[in-house]
Amino acid sequence: MDATRDGGIRSAPPAWGEMETDCLVHVFRRLALEDAAAAAPLVCRGWRRAAADPSLWRALDLRHDHVARFMPWGPLAAAFARRYGVARFAFAGFLTLCLARAAGSVSDLALPPLLSSPAAELDRVAACCPRLRRLALPPLLSAADEARLPELVPRWPLLQRLELESKPSSFPAVAAQLALHCPDLSGLKTSGAIKPEDAAAMAALLPRLRSLCLDSSYLPKQELLAILAGCSQLQEFSARNCVGFNEKDEEVVRRGARIERFEIGGSRFVDVLDDEMMADDEFCGSSYVDVM
């Protein structure tokens, strides 16, 4: 109790541990995920209860700065070893912890390329995240993992945006499942060699897309025009730094004029590049080499 200037008595503010859970949750939303996972729960029971609130775990950006955050020799691994006695820190374990804390409420999830067993971890995401609205996936390196993806799409009926860092070979099947099970899908981002069957799947199965990003892809003009013709509701389209069409092509520019945000800068034909440009270090280190 403290005395006021007029002689009255005022109550001292409550200790941090005695604050209402809702107030603590509001404060904890400003913490990084690793702090909410490894530090806050060990302060007291009140903090542990607040740190377990599912609303703190609805948006999981696990891709940001993932090398520094999730390596076994990093500070997060050290914190788990010191505070929880975890002898062998692994990203899969941290992902499991995050999904458990979220209690089925995850709406935004971005996964880094650290999946030790992509099939098992994607199955876990499908089982634990039925309310996903945005999903960003790393490259799936095996054909079996890519083939599994279409089977998982029906588990995310609320999906609004899908980001595939590398276009899977199963993309037409993925598009078919998106068309059947994700009526609110409006955004797609991917990169890779856009084949005729991929362009046809986008045009025929995903005509309601409003945002499409194909930056740094191998995208022949014929496939580009097919996509633009089929996806008539596009408001944003980006195909920057692509190989397969010229950014100044009059027909391409004309077709894109109806789109509010149409970005194709840096795109060019493969056959207009002379030997000097092909030898340039910057070009050879870019994603063009990966898609050709």
Image (tube, rainbow, N blue to C red):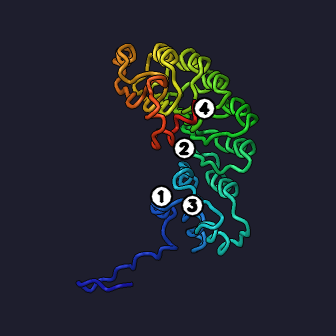
- The residue singled out by tag 3 in the image is 69
Cα separation between marks 1 and 3? 18 Å
Could you give the CA–CA distance between mark 3 and mark 4, rounded to whole angstroms? 26 Å
Q: Amino acid at mark 2?
A: Asp
Dot 4 crowding, Cα within 10 Å, few <14, some 14–19, many 20+: many
- Residue 258 falls left or right of residue 145: left
Circle 4 sits on which residue?
167
Q: What residue would you read off at disc 1?
A: 29
The quadrant in which residue 291 appears is top right
Please tell me whether mark 4 sits on a helix, a strand or a loop: loop
Q: Is residue 260 left or right of residue 170?
A: left
**Whole-percent x, y for residue 15 in the image:** 47, 76
Other residues around mark 2 within 10 Å, as few (<14) / some (14–19) / many (≥20): some
Q: Residue at x 45, y 40 (%)?
A: 280
Using the image as rendered, state which of residue 75 and residue 193 is in the foreground.
193
Q: Quadrant of the C terminus?
A: top right
Q: Amino acid at mark 1?
A: Arg
Looking at the rendered structure, the kind of residue marked 4 is: Lys
Residue 276 locus on image (x, y percent)? 44, 34
Name the one closer to the observer, 3 or 185: 185
Residue at 24%, 84% in the rendered image: 5
Q: Circle 2 sits on which residue?
A: 108
On the image, the x and y values in percent for residue 257 come to 34, 18
Could you tell me which secondary element the residue under label 3 belongs to? helix
Query: In 3D space, how far apart are the residues under numbered discs 2 and 3 (Cα atoms)?
Result: 19 Å
Q: Earlier in the sequence, mark 3 or mark 4?
A: 3
Helix, strand or loop for disc 2: strand
Q: Which numbered mark, 1 or 4, is in the foreground of this view?
A: 4
Nearer the observer, disc 1 or disc 3?
3
Name which residue type carries label 3.
Arg
Q: Measuring 60% from the left and 32% from the top, which residue is drawn there? A: 167
Looking at the rendered image, the quarter that the N terminus falls into is bottom left
